[in-house]
Amino acid sequence: MAERRRQMGEFAKAEQEWRAAEAIAGRMIAVQPKDPFARRYMIPEYRNWAMALAERRDAAGAVRTMRKAEARAGELLQTNYLRGPRLAARVQGWLADLYAQLGDRASGDAARAESVRLRRQLSARTDMPKDVLAEARAILAKADAEVTR
């Protein structure tokens, strides 16, 4: 609902929705700390929220919100959720995109390098779902092609 509100230009209402979702996720995590669902759910919500803040020129808020996505992805790595490593790498890619949008090239390059490092680790694993490995390998191939240009 928050993203729909944002798309309609109702940022204040969207932010209320994001805050409500964050509170619900926090309560779910408190009750079921090992269940990955609430963490998984909030990661793209934080991304959308951060990008909306960046559009509004709130760089500090955007980075702070994306760091929440990064923290949730890190928490997923401590659970038995097999797709957690993919999300950790994705969040770093999103963080790189956010920094690029904000004009912070050095931070963007660092986040992109971390995303590639995480994807290299992921692509070497044998215990991941096939779609996760395929995504990691495809993104690495693209990154390697960009380096050789």
Image (cartoon, rainbow, N blue to C red):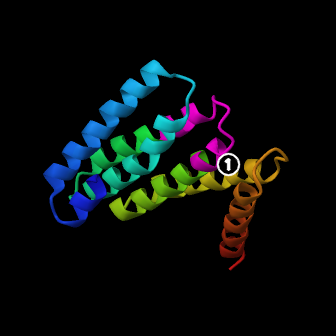
Return the x and y of residue 11 as percentages of the image width and height.
Answer: 17, 55
Q: Is residue 23 above or below residue 10?
A: above
Name the side, left or right, on which 109 lies relative to 137. Answer: left
Badge 1 local density, few (<14 within 10 Å), some, or many (20+)? some
Which secondary structure type mostly characterizes the magenta part of the structure? helix
* Total numbered labels: 1
94 magenta-colored: no
Front position in the image: 24 or 105: 24
Quarter in which the N terminus is drawn: bottom left
Front position in the image: 101 or 87: 87
Segment tinted magenta in the rendering: 70-87
Q: Amino acid at mark 1?
A: Leu
Q: In what element is the residue under mark 1?
A: helix
Q: Is residue 55 visible?
A: no
Return the x and y of residue 46 as percentages of the image width and height.
Answer: 38, 46
Q: Is residue 15 above or below residue 81?
A: below
86 magenta-colored: yes
Say which residue label 1 marks.
Answer: 118
Name the side, left or right, on which 65 lies relative to 97. Answer: left
Return the x and y of residue 66 as percentages of the image width and height.
Answer: 40, 46
Name the side, left or right, on which 26 lies relative to 134. Answer: left
Q: Is residue 59 visible?
A: yes
